[in-house]
Image: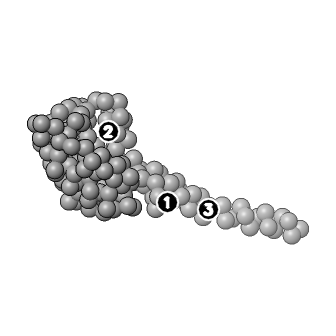
Amino acid sequence: MATRAASAERVQRAPSAARFGGAIILVVTSCGIIGCGNGQRGDDGFKEIRAAVTRGRYADAIPRLERYLANRPRRPNASRAGLFLGKCHLALGRFQEAAQAFETTIAEHRRSPEAHKCRYKLAVLALVQGEREDAIRRFGALADQPDGPLAPEAAAMHRYLTATPKTSRGRSPL
């Protein structure tokens, strides 16, 4: 008899559980759209933009990255978008635009890993443009930050550039 009473009690509770079931579905759906506090980022269109960059579709990615940054300047992927924007311009030989994107990313996301990567890209850009002393200074500053993701590479470039004499035209052999 006790079993029937427990079964009847569960049946009476079912309607209230159904109401909560709808709320649970809403919460799960919302987490998929906007992201939840579990460390995962919500799908805000960044994956598709990143795919365009990694596939080498730089000209296609630039306006999408610019829109992304204009509409989502404080989103978790904003620093990555700024880095990617600079990389796209760099790949297309647009050095001024690349430098501007890197500088903006550094200014807006100073402590992010992407800001460190942007500093490295600026050092490489200085070297590519024949600004050897600026490149040495930039690589040296990065090498002095041993916790940065590219500190070992920066230290190696700094050692190489300071040990390699300038050519007769004032440039390193790189």
Which numbered marker is on residue 49?
Answer: 2
* Contact (Cβ within 8 Å) of mark 2 with mark 3: no
Foreground pick, 77 / 174: 174
Identify residue for label 1.
38
**In this rendering, position of residue 16 left or right of residue 12:** left
Q: Secondary structure at mark 2?
A: helix
Residue type beneath disc 1: Asn
**In this rendering, position of residue 36 left or right of residue 48:** right
Residue drawn at point x = 81 percent, y = 68 percent: 5
Quarter in which the C terminus is drawn: top left
Residue type beneath disc 2: Ile
Q: Secondary structure at mark 1?
A: loop
Mark 1 and mark 3 lie on one chain; the one further toward the N terminus is: 3
Residue type beneath disc 3: Ala
Q: Which residue ends up furthest to the right in the rendered image? A: 1
Identify residue for label 3.
17
Which numbered marker is on residue 163?
Answer: none
Mark 1 and mark 2 lie on one chain; the one further toward the N terminus is: 1
Crowd class of label 2 (few under 14; some 14 to 19; many from 20; radius 10 Å): many
**In this rendering, position of residue 15 left or right of residue 134:** right
Spatial CA span between label 2 and label 3: 41 Å
Spatial CA span between label 1 and label 2: 23 Å
Residue drawn at point x = 20 percent, y = 55 percent: 137
* Contact (Cβ within 8 Å) of mark 1 with mark 2: no
